[in-house]
Image: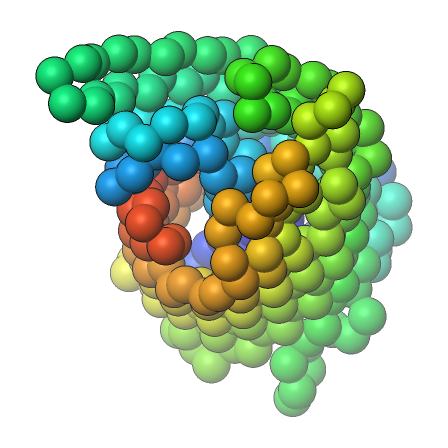
Amino acid sequence: MNKIFFLLSLSCVFLSSKAVEVDEILTQKDNIKMDLMLSYSNIKRERGVFLPLQYQTENGDFVTVPTFMGEQQANQDYINYALNLKYGVNSDLEIFTLLNLYSSDIHFSQGSQFETKSDRGFGSWVLGANYQIKAEDERPSLLVGAMINMVERVTFSNQEHKNIEFKSYRLSATTYYTVDPLVYLLNISYNYNEKKEYNDLSIDKGEQLLLSPQLYFAVNPYSSIHLGIKYAFIGKSRVDDKVVSNSGSNISYSFGSSYEISSNTIMNITAEHSKQLNISRDSLSLGFSYSF
């Protein structure tokens, strides 16, 4: 589900000190919302083997970080630029389109040898929808979502890039409940990846199951803080039909704050730390949401 959508919208909801209403969570009918997001990640690898590493951006999309072959120690600076446009079809349904761009600089060493690899450009183009099944009353709400990567840029083991179409999908369910001044939110999602091929090369990324509880707390009438834990179970990943990472799980932690700049503009900042196998990642995201 579109995670930043909930992070920003829920801040508006409980800053207003009233129960969550669907017209505050979903984009209102015939209205448009625009989310701009800048995310920086520092990724450290104890061994720079080729892994199709994925992480979830604050827009809710999954981004594949370009990687490389070798046995080097690696330190990577990765920046994701995202633009998300959402349209309210009716009171229960919104559709959205998400564009990701990126820049990457990998500094790695092997013995006394040092090298830097840089890459930047198009990341992915995503289409999706969010639908409310049940509004919040004396019981929690329930919303479902679906996303598909229409086009995504894939880096293969020879470091060649190829735009691949219709190979990644995501389904999710989200529930939330308000106990003023707190909002409890739980998101469950499943990310499915088909095998991506180019000439005699291939990448088969493992499926991902994520469980993400979140808690929001109002600080004052204009700002809030939120924190959360994300549990992920990731299946086996293969490169050129060879297993490069076994199935396993990891936990990441996030903390952030939101500020209502005006009645139609919200700023959100989130920091996250995670460790997956021999890879650790620290990220900081800055986002703006504007309604018109």
Using residue 212 as the reference point, say whether residue 257 is left or right of it.
left
Q: Using the image, determine if residue 115 lies above or below residue 110.
A: above
Residue 1 percent location from the top left of the image: 66, 54
In the picture as drawn, the residue positioned furthest to the left comes out as: 112
Tell which of 268 and 232 is nearer to you: 232
Rendered residue at 66%/87% (across/down): 139
**Identity of the residue drawn at 27% across and 28% down:** 72
| Residue 179 visible within the image | yes
The reply to whether residue 27 is visible in this rendering is no
User: Which residue corresponds to the image point at 72% horizontal and 53% vertical from the top-left?
Assistant: 192
Residue 137 picture location, percent across and down = 68, 82
Image position of 152 with respect to 174: above or below: above
From the viewer's perspective, tell me whether residue 90 is left or right of residue 214.
Answer: right
In front: 84, or 245? 245
Q: Quadrant of residue 128?
A: top right
State the quadrant of the C terminus: top right
Q: Position of residue 56 (x, y in %)?
A: 52, 46
Seen from the viewer's position, the closer of residues 251 and 47 is 47
76 shown above or below 52: above
